[in-house]
Image (tube, rainbow, N blue to C red):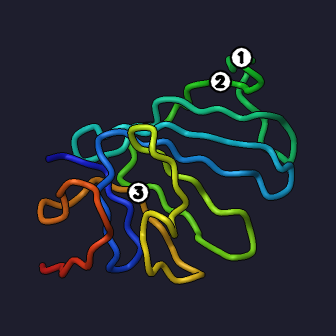
Amino acid sequence: MNAICLVAGLLVLPLGEAVTLQWTHSVQKTLWAEDYRLQGDHLLLTSARVQGTGAGMEPPLDAVLRDGAWHYRPALPPLPAVQMRHSPYVAPYTLCHDGDCRTPAEWLPGLPDESILELRPCHKNEAQPPSTAKMVTMRP
């Protein structure tokens, strides 16, 4: 099974071949969302949405206002991973897979209050159906 994994240290959870990452901008308090899908051993950012403008984060000129949000496709090459900071000082990210949307702490029970999170293609020994986070021993 090929999947995108949510990783925090030794906590690893395969989510599936497509995920949506959502967050509230810490200054503007507007919702942002990005859709990623697995493309080989990379993540492809297929679309993005933002519910407002400002704080140095303007949507691109080709963005279309639809359903209260600016929709656009970022011009980025496939990415090896996406890193995020999990912190009690800002609203948590939300990760959605197959209509199931949860915070990282809900996806990864035992997640420390402050962590570096990563979305990346799962390694061969990590790609199992999503249920609960598990500890994975990584070997060279």
- State the residue in front, 42 or 22: 22
Amino acid type, label 2: His
N-terminal label among 3 and 2: 2
> Which residue is denoted by mark 3 in the rendering?
119
How far, Cα to Cα, is label 3 from label 1?
27 Å
Determine crowd level at label 3: few under 14, some 14-19, many 20+ residues with C-alpha closer than 10 A. Answer: many
Amino acid type, label 3: Leu
Amino acid type, label 1: Arg
> Which residue is denoted by mark 1 in the rendering?
66
Q: Tell me the mark number nearer the camera, choosing from 2 and 1.
A: 1
Q: Secondary structure at mark 3?
A: strand
Number of disc labels: 3
The C terminus: image quadrant = bottom left
Q: Position of residue 32 (x, y in %)?
A: 68, 42
Q: Position of residue 116 (x, y in %)?
A: 51, 73
Q: Is residue 81 above or below residue 58?
A: below
N-terminal label among 2 and 1: 1
- Residue 71: image tag: 2
- What residue is drawn where x is 85% and y is 56%? 27
Q: Is residue 73 above or below residue 54?
A: above
> In the rendered structure, are the residues bearing label 2 and label 1 in contact, judged by CB atoms less than 8 Å apart?
yes
Q: Position of residue 29 (x, y in %)?
A: 83, 50
Where on the picture, by quarter, is residue 87?
bottom right
- Residue 124: image tag: none
Apparent side of residue 31 relative to residue 128 in the rendered image (left or right): right
